[in-house]
Image (spheres, rainbow, N blue to C red):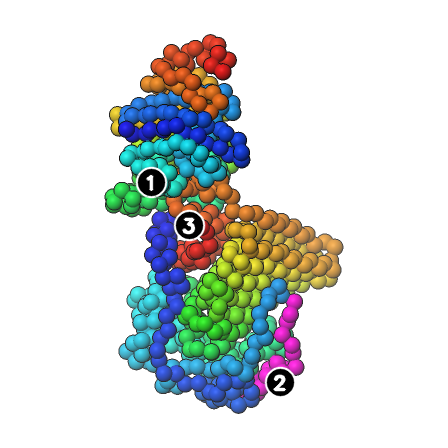
Amino acid sequence: MFLEIKDLSVKIENKNILKSLNLNINKGEVHAIMGPNGSGKSTLANVLAGKEDYEILNGRINFKDNDLFDLNIEERAQEGMFLAFQYPVEIPGVNITPFLHSAINSKRKRMNEEEIDNLSFAKLLKSKANDLGINIDMLKRSVNTGFSGGEKKRYEILQMSILNPDLSILDETDSGLDIDALKIVTDGVNKLKTKDNSFLIITHYQKLLDYIKPDYVHVMVNGSIVKSGGSEIADEIEKDGFQKFQ
Amino acid sequence: MNSETLNTLDSYSKNKYKYGFVTEIDDEKPKKGLNEDTIKFISLKKNEPKWMLDWRLKAYSKWKKIKEPKWANLSFPEIDYQNIYYYSAPKGFEKKPKDLSEVDPKLIETYNKLGIPLEEQKVLAGVAVDVVFDSVSVATTYKGELEKLGIIFCSIGEAIQKHPDLIKKYLGSVIPPGDHSFSALNSAVFTDGSFVYIPEGVKCPMELSTYFRINAENTGQFERTLIIADKGSYVSYLEGCTAPKRDDNQLHAANVELIALEDAEIKYSTVQNWYPGDEDGKGGIYNFVTKRGLCAGKNSKISWTQVETGSAITWKYPSCILKGDNSIGEFYSVAITNNFQQADTGTKMTHIGKNTKSKIISKGISLGKSQNTYRGEVSFLRKADKARNYTQCDSLLVGNQCGAHTVPYIDSKNNTAVIEHEASTSKINEDQLYYCRQRGLSHEEAVSLIVNGFCKQVLQELPMEFAVEAQKLVSISLEGSVG
């Protein structure tokens, strides 16, 4: 099994957020999690990435034959887990090129692969930016600093394409995007999709799923997955909202 | 920051203070303590003329009457001036080595460990290095090439012998020996340092650089640097410092004087990583430095850039006296304190001439249990019409046991002066750390990256060759502070 979440219960500040959640994802699959605000979708994304604010009450998560709780944030990332943030944070004064170059090399180091040199990396970054329709001038700026919402999301996808993760988690990537930006972002994801990597797409709206076709759709309500199925579920939600699942 | 920096961070984290080795060389010292005999010993060893000895003795008599300044936000035990050696030179250095083959191989090895290749051909492209090992200048590189342009770049000792007129005219002209106790002390017992003279209209084609290094135990280092840029000339000077690990505290009290005549520009950059003491606050350098520049002529400019990461105690205020009309003073500073380090640093901009401008950018980073103070004074004298100052002080706190303090003084006697002041204090942002780590960077790498980003405005003022080194230093000084 590629990713296996079993009986996961999580709380933060005395509030139970996830309750006996189960989810399995195989290699090459695209899963979508939909749910109303406050259902615990983003918590799930952050628990997977390893954010330290949460208390794990019960359950386990296996990722590529690792007990995920044995790995810290950066080790999970180096193992191939990528979280595209809902609100990417600004890091003033830090240029994207050395930032991503360090990131990719720390991953290669863990995988016992040879590090990539400055020049090859600069070339790689340029060509990926080109593929995603990202202006080269954007590469000269500090990470996320002064970017519009749409620019930040495109930047996340650029980073994803450079790091080439095994599991990509997109946390409400569609929020705040106009239709053009949404197309650029979803095109990027579709290009990255292979039979060897997997995606977990967290979204509030069905719109995103017009552009990325999931193999499975899960409905999350009150910290648990209450229904799973194919893309027809997304259509149901589009029509009737989350009401009937609550 | 590039990945090279991160890689070196990795390798450095195993050695902690990388430069904490001791070179074993027989050295020759007078008896401990400060008195007229010590000063005469120094003057004799350096074969100085009588006027120089008299100058020193006069400074000494002033020192005896002045108390140490106590206004800084620093606490440390009383300095015992009678328990310090004031002169230390590797034996047999009265006769200077003519070339490298005459230099003790152990010295060469020391410099190799520091990453300063002494051989001219290996010197960083375009950098002339005047190396000070304890109190004697060992070798001066690129001298010949500079001589062709009429540039004088030598040790202060040599300048006293060969250029007495310049020394008599300018030494102590910006920092009078009686200014305060550390300037009096330095004037009495200074042993070596650099002297630079750039003739009229000459743009110095390379960065001039000195590496200072304190080696012998219980030795105070009192270097004296004097840089004169004649009309319309330009020079960029870089000073770098390291000192070996010792349990005792060592005293360092340097004086640096800069003089820029009409249309001249001096850029002075410092990378200071003296031994800061250990995790428990034991040992480390006491760094009491006086640096002052005089923009003597019209349209002259003096720019100080400092990266201060070392020393147990830093007391340092590189200043500009803006006397010439339209002259410009700048101060760019990064000060990082970790563990039990204390830094009280900043600048003084004194506007005397019309249309004078000054700019202050200060970035303080506090970690561990350290205390970091920015102290600045901007004053406008009566005739300083339309003078301007811009000050920006930013402090970054890492952890919750350290302190950041900002003490800006403004004094204006001219109502046409324009002053802008911006200040900020922030804690390192957990969301930024999470973001970096989610991309695969370790906690330590992430902190280093964020701090380097915070300092970028200052680091980019450094000469290219040293910017990378400074970034590495920033990373090294953050070690062990996060967990």
Instruction: Point out which mark residue B307 bears.
Output: none
In the rendered structure, which amino acid carries the disc numbered 2?
Ser
Front residue of B70/B470: it is B70
- The range drawn in magenta is B50-71
Q: Which mark identifies residue B444?
A: 3
Q: Please give the residue where the numbered disc 2 appears in the rendered image.
A: B61
Instruction: Please indicate whether residue B317 sits to the left or right of residue A33 in the image.
Output: right
Crowd around label 3: few <14 · some 14–19 · many ≥20 (10 Å)? many
Question: Badge 1, how many Cα within 10 Å: few under 14, some, many 20+?
Answer: many
Front disc: 2 or 1: 1
Tell me the chain of label 2.
B
Q: Are marks 2 and 1 on the same chain?
A: no
Q: Which residue is mark 1?
A: A78
Height in image: B333 above or below A86? below
Q: Main secondary structure of the magenta part?
A: helix
Residue contact between numbered discs 1 and 3, judged by CB atoms under 8 Å? no
Chain letter of disc 1 in the image: A
Does the segment drawn in magenta span residue B355?
A: no
Q: Residues within 10 Å of mark 2 (few under 14, many from 20)?
A: some
The amino acid type found where label 3 is placed reads Glu
Q: Are marks 2 and 3 in contact (CB under 8 Å)?
A: no
Image point 57% across, 59% down: which residue? B371
Chain of the residue under label 3: B
**Residue A67 percent coordinates (x, y):** 33, 37
In space, the residues marked 2 and 1 are separated at their CA atoms by 65 Å
Residue depicted at x 72% and y 58%: B412
Q: Secondary structure at mark 2?
A: helix
Q: Nearer the viewer, residue B153 or B344?
A: B344
Tell me the residue at 64%/51% (across/down): B421
The mark lying in front, picked from 2 and 3, is 3
